[in-house]
């Protein structure tokens, strides 16, 4: 007791001496003695710290001795922070507040002094600043040991302490580059402060019963819930202040250029940690959406700088290491944004426009990088690092259980908004490559993103990503995506998207496991793969009805590329669907085919008849053999009527899969094609046939020409009659003045040339020379040489000319046949349209590889299209032609990755513009006019309508149809189950065919009545 009293007396004596001393140096010495004395009583410790607060000099000028005094005061107080100070926390915190305010005032003054080289003063102040930051970190740790959630006055002091010290820490870290040798130490201690305050917030949050606050319904009479609310408000106030300071430091570190990586990491991770406290209570006090936008803006700014750098002239490939150096910080921002958005999806939804824009920018940036050879590595790194992170950011909203279905649909509507087409100018490709301006991506705002074509490819890539990841999406999101499938087709009709869709190779992740490999795939195939994946996922969900609607509505899409995609999906469905479903689809299509049959439309590729036939033929390649047989039997069978002939020709011209028929049915079909072909040739001179105005003139020729590739075994049956028939057609064309018949002969000429080009043994026939000479007379020296109809025959002529490599040609000027062949090749090579150039060079390449001729220059005219200089278009050079031919043949033999040129893109864009204009015309057809015209026709023909047949007749016809179908289904089992005699089996089939025809007539009569 005597020793303790003596120690206390010494303490009071020292404090009195310090108070009474006017000399700063003396106060310092006395404080050092005080530090050595030590104190064990909490009450005395509180008095000591209060005295130290009073002793702290609040001077306006930075003096060495006074600065030393304040530094010593901190040392004395810091000595006790590791001890039990639970009873005097307020005193230590108050000292920190006063010291923080003082240091904050003098920091700017000291930095100015640094510029004036007052190093001794400055060094001492920076030492004091470091000591204060250490004291702050220790104070936050002490507060974490003794939570002060039951003393309102103390809680206010702690909040002020947090505010002042974090401000000082923020200012200190912001100026570390000007602090010179103390910069690294200030940075290190500053991070300790940040780490300590984050731990403090976590401890305080754990001490609050957040569940109780959420569950309370009314104020408790004893006020316990009010005390709990005060605790929660205190925690929220501290956390709010801390989050604000951490965000500012995070932005500062991001803009620093790399020297503050540790602060960048600590600050944003700290923000995420604090936002996870209190079960979302911070969302009420903080602008969470603004924090997410800050992270997004940091990511966009980093990418913008990279885009500006790479948009300039590049001479070297951007390495993987360089790309990772740029993209890794961006990934860090995105990951933290994902964590916050997942925690607060409702708050993030308020910023969904900027979030979706960021995702679109990254998706677009990756595609534009992949277009440049020097930037492909950067594109691959972006696809690996950033695209998954940005997609998770979007999914944090789409897959959130807290968002309503209409909110998710709103996001999808905003992302995949139908573009405004009011500025469309048909045939004007002047704005080519609007989708390839890399440096323009990051200048787009969320308000005008819909009008920016540069984002179109990114939208498509993002949509494909959604389709491919459909298994991970919620049902309501799948439904929303299904309703946007029409948007995809509309966008593909854009001229630039169309061009890039055909030639662009995009990087995709292949394989499973931890290390998927990156591979390049044509964009068109990526679209098909994504749509098929999505079909599988939604096949057993409510979205399937929307999927069926989409497939049906676009069955006859006017844009050929969109139609190809839709039909590929139909084929995919038919390939994997149940047999009953497939047969029902095929039956309905066959019924539709019969309803549009007409002789006028069968030879028009874009007619409804040909479109439906094309669709049926595509689907039949994926069905069973019995289904193909059934379609042939129902549409063709043994019926030789005009309607059957029209349908059969239409199907054959669209690639009916004869090879998929059963052997018996294929044999029947082949015999029919050949017999009708020979019958037509034999009766060709008959005036009644040539003057026939109904049916398809020359239908057997069209049928054989279309089916030759499937009838290789029967080609030997085609003899010299075909050559003589061709000669007759050529002469008939030249001698006819009737335009209708002339057009018929022109079509027969093209088809017959196609037949001969597939029947190679005819080239060795004696009649081939006559054919060649007749063709020369027709195309070169005949009276109809200027006839524009012949222009349409030149593609068939080119295929015919390719086969001339199988005949012997004399290489002298005395050979009439050889001269005719040279001249015919000359007219092909002079054609300057790119399609004819390709046909001619392909034909000549086949010919050159097989002919025995060595003087190939005889076949090439001096003014061949490929001989002209591409730039001037004036100078023709034979060597240039041979060089182009050599390049073409080498490309045909090699499997090279084609890099599209600007010229190719321009051609595709022009083609896309024409297709777009065609769709525009289709969409602007006035259906009202059509209805009126139909009504007028109906009124006009009203008098000619037949009376309604009795119900009994209609019912009987339906029963006959049902019985016919039952018999047809049993036919495959007829021979193997009941009939051993093939002759009896054939007779049954013949009678069944007649029965089928008669019932078909009855059905027609009942339908027209």
Image (cartoon, rainbow, N blue to C red):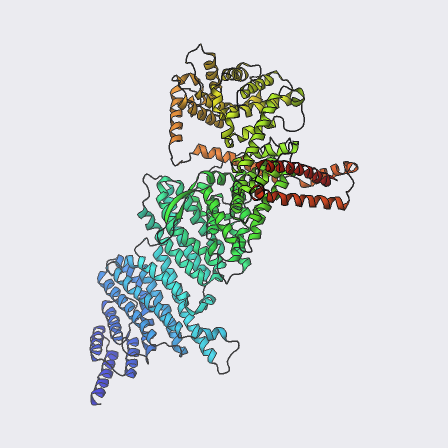
Is residue 463 visible to the viewer in this orientation of the structure?
no
Q: Residue furthest front?
A: 980
Which is more toward the observer, 662 or 480? 662
Q: Is residue 247 visible?
A: yes
Q: How many marks?
A: 0
**What residue is shown at x 40% (from left), y 70% (from top)?**
238
| Image location of residue 967, percent across then percent down | 63, 43
Q: Nearer the viewer, residue 197 or 795?
A: 795
Q: Is residue 845 above or below residue 943?
A: above
Q: Position of residue 792 (x, y in %)?
A: 55, 25
Q: Quadrant of residue 177?
A: bottom left
Vertical position of residue 513 compared to residue 747: above or below = below
If the image is split into quadrants, where does the C terminus sit?
Answer: top right
Name above or below for residue 470 compared with residue 869.
below
Drawn side of residue 434 relative to residue 1000, left or right = left
Left or right side of 221 for 126: left
Q: Is residue 760 left or right of residue 970?
A: left
Q: Which residue, as the protein is rendered here, is positioned at the far bottom?
A: 1
Counting from the top left corner in percent of width and height, residue 884 is at 40, 25
Q: Nearer the viewer, residue 614 or 977?
A: 977
**Which residue is at the far top?**
814
Q: Which quadrant of the structure image shows residue 937?
A: top right
Q: Quadrant of the N terminus?
A: bottom left
Give left or right: position of 507 versus 85.
right
- The relative height of residue 1000 versus residue 91 in the rendered view (above or below) is above
Between residues 978 and 208, which one lies in front from this camera angle?
978
Question: Percent position (x, y) of residue 564?
Answer: 52, 40
């Amino acid at each position: 007791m005597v020793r303790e009293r003596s120690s206390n007396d010494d303490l009071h004596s020292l404090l009195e001496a310090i108070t009474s001393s006017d000399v700063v140096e003396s106060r310092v010495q006395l404080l050092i003695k005080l530090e050595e004395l030590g104190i064990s009583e909490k009450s005395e410790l509180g008095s000591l710290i209060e005295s130290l607060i009073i002793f702290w000099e609040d001077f306006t000028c930075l003096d060495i001795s006074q600065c030393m005094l304040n530094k010593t005061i901190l040392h004395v107080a810091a000595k006790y922070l590791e001890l039990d100070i639970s009873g005097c926390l307020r005193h230590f915190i108050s000292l920190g507040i006063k010291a923080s305010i003082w240091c904050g005032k003098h920091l700017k003054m000291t930095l100015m002094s640094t510029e004036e080289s007052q190093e001794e003063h400055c060094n001492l102040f920076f030492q004091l600043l470091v000591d204060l930051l250490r004291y702050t970190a220790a104070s936050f740790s002490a507060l974490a040991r003794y939570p002060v959630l039951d003393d309102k006055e103390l809680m206010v002091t702690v909040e002020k302490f947090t505010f002042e010290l974090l401000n000082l820490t923020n200012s200190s870290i912001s100026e570390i580059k000007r602090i010179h040798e103390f910069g690294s130490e200030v940075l290190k201690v500053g991070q300790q402060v940040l780490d300590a305050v984050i731990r403090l917030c976590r401890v305080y949050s754990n001490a609050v019963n957040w569940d109780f606050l959420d569950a309370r319904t009314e104020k408790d009479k004893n006020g316990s819930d009010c005390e709990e609310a005060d605790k929660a408000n205190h925690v929220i106030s501290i956390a709010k202040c801390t989050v604000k300071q951490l965000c500012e430091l995070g932005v500062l570190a991001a803009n620093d250029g790399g020297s503050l990586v540790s602060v960048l990491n600590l600050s944003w991770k700290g923000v995420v940690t604090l936002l996870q406290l209190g079960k979302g209570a911070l969302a009420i006090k903080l602008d969470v959406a603004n924090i997410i936008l800050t992270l997004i803006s940091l990511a966009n700014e980093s990418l913008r700088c990279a885009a500006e750098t790479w948009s300039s002239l590049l001479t070297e490939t951007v390495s993987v290491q360089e790309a990772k150096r740029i993209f890794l910080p961006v990934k860090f921002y995105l990951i933290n944004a994902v964590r916050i958005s997942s925690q607060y999806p409702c708050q993030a939804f308020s910023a969904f426009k900027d979030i979706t824009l960021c995702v679109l920018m990254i998706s677009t940036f990756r595609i534009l990088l992949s277009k440049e050879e020097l930037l492909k590595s950067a594109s691959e790194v972006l696809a690996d690092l950033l695209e998954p992170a940005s997609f998770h950011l979007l999914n944090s909203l789409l897959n959130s259980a807290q968002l309503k279905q209409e909110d998710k649909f709103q996001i999808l509507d905003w992302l995949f908004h139908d573009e405004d087409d009011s500025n469309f100018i048909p045939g004007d490709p002047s704005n080519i490559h609007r989708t390839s301006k890399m440096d323009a991506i990051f200048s787009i705002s969320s308000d005008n993103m819909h009008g920016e074509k540069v984002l179109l490819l990114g939208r498509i890539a993002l949509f494909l990503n959604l389709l491919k990841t459909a298994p991970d999406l919620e049902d309501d999101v799948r439904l929303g995506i299904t309703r946007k499938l029409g948007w995809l087709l509309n966008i593909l009709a854009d001229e630039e998207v169309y061009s890039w869709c055909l030639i662009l190779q995009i990087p995709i992740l292949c394989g499973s496991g931890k290390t998927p490999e990156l591979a390049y795939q044509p964009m068109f195939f990526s679209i098909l793969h994504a749509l098929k994946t999505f079909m599988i996922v939604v096949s057993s969900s409510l979205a399937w009805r929307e999927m069926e609607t989409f497939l049906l509505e676009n069955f006859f899409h006017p844009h050929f590329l969109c139609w190809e995609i839709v039909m590929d999906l139909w084929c995919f469905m038919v390939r994997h669907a149940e047999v009953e479903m497939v047969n029902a689809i095929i039956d309905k299509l066959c019924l539709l085919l019969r309803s549009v049959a007409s002789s006028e439309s069968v030879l028009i590729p874009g007619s409804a008849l040909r479109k439906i036939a094309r669709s049926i033929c595509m689907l039949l390649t994926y069905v069973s053999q019995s289904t193909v047989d059934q379609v042939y039997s129902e549409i063709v069978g043994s019926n030789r009527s005009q309607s059957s002939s029209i349908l059969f020709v239409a199907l054959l011209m669209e690639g009916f899969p004869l090879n998929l028929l059963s052997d018996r049915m294929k044999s029947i079909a082949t015999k029919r094609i050949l017999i009708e072909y020979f019958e037509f040739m034999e009766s060709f001179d008959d005036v009644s046939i040539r003057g026939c105005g109904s049916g398809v003139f020359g239908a057997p020729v069209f049928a054989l020409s279309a089916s030759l590739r499937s009838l290789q075994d029967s080609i030997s049956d085609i003899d010299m009659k075909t050559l003589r028939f061709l000669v007759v057609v050529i002469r008939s064309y030249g001698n006819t003045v009737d335009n209708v018949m002339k057009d018929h002969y022109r079509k027969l000429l093209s088809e017959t040339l196609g037949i001969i080009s597939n029947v190679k043994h005819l080239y060795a026939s004696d009649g081939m020379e006559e054919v060649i000479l007749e063709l020369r007379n027709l195309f070169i020296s005949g009276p109809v040489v200027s006839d524009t109809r012949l222009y349409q025959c030149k593609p068939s002529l080119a295929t015919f000319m390719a086969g001339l490599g199988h005949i012997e040609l004399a290489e002298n000027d005395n050979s009439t046949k050889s001269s005719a062949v040279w001249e015919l090749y000359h007219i092909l090579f002079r054609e300057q349209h790119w399609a004819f150039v390709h046909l001619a060079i392909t034909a000549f390449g086949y010919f050159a590889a097989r002919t025995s001729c060595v003087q190939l220059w005889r076949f090439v005219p001096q003014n061949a299209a490929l001989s002209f200089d591409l730039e001037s278009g004036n100078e023709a050079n034979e060597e240039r032609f041979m060089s182009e031919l050599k390049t073409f043949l080498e490309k045909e033999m090699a499997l090279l990755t084609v890099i599209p040129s600007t010229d190719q893109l321009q051609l595709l864009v022009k083609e896309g513009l024409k297709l777009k204009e065609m769709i525009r015309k289709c969409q602007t057809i006035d259906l009202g006019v059509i209805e009126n015209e139909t009504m007028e026709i109906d009124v006009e023909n009203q008098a000619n309508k037949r009376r309604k047949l009795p119900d009994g007749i209609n019912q009987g016809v339906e029963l006959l149809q049902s019985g016919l179908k039952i018999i047809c289904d049993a036919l495959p089992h007829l021979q193997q189950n009941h009939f051993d005699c093939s002759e009896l089996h054939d007779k049954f089939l013949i009678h069944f065919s007649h029965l089928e025809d008669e019932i078909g007539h009855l059905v027609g009569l009942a339908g027209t009545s």
